[in-house]
């Protein structure tokens, strides 16, 4: 049973590399599940996709729809250990960016090649389709269909309340670029903006893209003190602070912010202190935690759900 008609569940919330010391916030690299109107999306294939895979029952009628924001290791490193990829009755559809050279499928195949990885891509049993996406493209998912349809940027995507839309924006606010996703259904919207660095005066393109979403997941890897540290300055590394995340939310009229892509060196106490400080600035700000689950309700509120 889906826990809610529009929910977000966090399976991995760390950036860069895993942080196994954290029991409350969790240590897996990025993976977020979005369930909407009976359809399910998996955003990023960091290590969090491994426990997600263990809890999933593959079926050829219900493909796994995976969207990759970019190809940095922390966003793809869980895929080889995602159990369904080895099941003959599973079907994975992977949407993501074209790498600088070659195709996305060739890139993934290379990640699965010995000696880097023991089991070659072609020896996994699941059916796989790999589809490259582009800035301004849309995934359009009609009711009672097993898969979304990719609508390229120059085509017009129809809008209908029963259709789940995933709008795609490409951003250069991260080394080599990153895709941001906006999931819309029935007047509700969720924005996933990980691996982005804030701009002076806030990221206006992101503010436009995220306008009036109900909730935004935004990169907040560093405190402002770390970001501006003169000895080990993190400017230009492609990540944000809670202040930058909140600035985007306020400018885009988004009532709820989830701080995401936590630095692996930040322990639970550090992150809870960061959350409390951010809440002074913007009360509906929360640090993403593994197994945290949010519901976007019909009345436009965001509720914390108990994990089933
Ligand atoms: Zn990352
Ligand atoms: Zn990255």
Image (cartoon, helix red, strand yellow):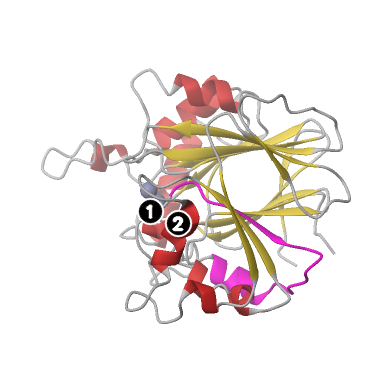
Could you tell whether 294 is left or right of 28 in the image?
Answer: right
Query: Residue 59 lies in magenta, yes or no?
Result: yes
Q: Which residue extends farthest bottom?
A: 118
For disc 2, does the CB lie below 8 Å from ligand 1? yes
Please rate how many residues cluster around mark 2, counting C-alpha atoms within 10 Å: few if below 14, some from 14 to 19, many from 20: many
Seen at 71% across and 64% down, the residue is 307
Q: Residue 75 carries which label?
A: 2
Could you tell whether 224 is left or right of 218 in the image?
Answer: left
Seen at 55% across and 72% down, the residue is 50
Q: Is mark 1 on a helix, strand or loop?
A: loop
Q: Can residue 282 be seen in this view?
A: yes
In the rendered image, the vertical position of residue 202 relative to residue 124, given as above or below: above
Q: What stretch is highlighted in magenta?
A: 49-70
Image quadrant where residue 57 sits: bottom right
Q: Which mark is residue 207?
A: none
The foreground one among 287 and 66 is 66
Mark 2 and mark 1 in contact? Answer it, CB < 8 Å: yes
Residue 23: % across, % down: 47, 70
Query: Residue 256 lies in magenta, yes or no?
Result: no
Residue 282: % across, % down: 52, 32
Q: Can residue 216 be seen in this view?
A: no
Seen at 78% across and 69% down, the residue is 60
Quadrant position of the C terminus in the picture: bottom right
In the picture of the structure, the residue carrying the numbered disc 1 is 72
Q: Is mark 2 on a helix, strand or loop?
A: helix
Residue 39: % across, % down: 78, 52
For disc 1, does the CB lie below 8 Å from ligand 2? yes
Q: Distance between the residues labelled 2 and 1?
A: 6 Å
């Amino acid at each position: 049973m889906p826990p809610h008609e529009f929910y977000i569940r966090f399976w991995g919330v760390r950036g860069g590399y895993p942080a196994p010391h954290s029991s409350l916030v969790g240590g897996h690299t990025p993976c977020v599940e979005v369930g909407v109107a009976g359809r399910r999306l998996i955003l990023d294939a960091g290590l969090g996709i491994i426990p997600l895979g263990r809890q999933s029952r593959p079926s050829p009628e219900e493909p796994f729809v995976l969207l990759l924001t970019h190809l940095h290791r922390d966003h793809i490193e869980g895929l080889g250990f995602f159990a369904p990829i080895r099941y003959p009755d599973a079907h994975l559809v992977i949407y993501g960016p074209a790498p600088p050279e070659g195709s996305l499928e060739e890139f993934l195949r290379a990640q699965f090649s010995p000696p880097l990885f023991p089991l070659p891509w072609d020896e996994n049993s699941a059916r796989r389709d790999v589809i490259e996406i582009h800035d301004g493209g849309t995934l359009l998912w009609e009711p009672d269909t097993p898969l979304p349809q990719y609508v390229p940027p120059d085509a017009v995507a129809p809008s209908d309340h029963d259709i789940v839309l995933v709008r795609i924006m490409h951003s250069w606010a991260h080394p080599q670029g990153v895709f941001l996703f906006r999931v819309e259904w029935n007047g509700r919207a969720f924005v996933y903006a990980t691996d982005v660095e804030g701009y002076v005066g806030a990221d206006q393109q992101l503010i436009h893209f995220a306008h009036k979403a109900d909730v935004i997941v935004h990169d907040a890897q560093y405190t402002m003190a770390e970001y501006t540290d003169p000895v080990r300055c993190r400017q230009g590394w492609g990540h944000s602070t809670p202040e930058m995340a909140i600035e985007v939310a306020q400018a885009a009229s988004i009532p709820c912010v989830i701080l995401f892509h936590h630095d692996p060196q930040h322990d639970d106490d550090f992150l809870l202190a960061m959350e409390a400080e951010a809440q002074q600035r913007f009360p509906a700000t929360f640090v993403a935690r593994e197994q945290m689950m949010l519901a976007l309700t019909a009345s436009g509120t965001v509720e914390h759900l108990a994990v089933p």
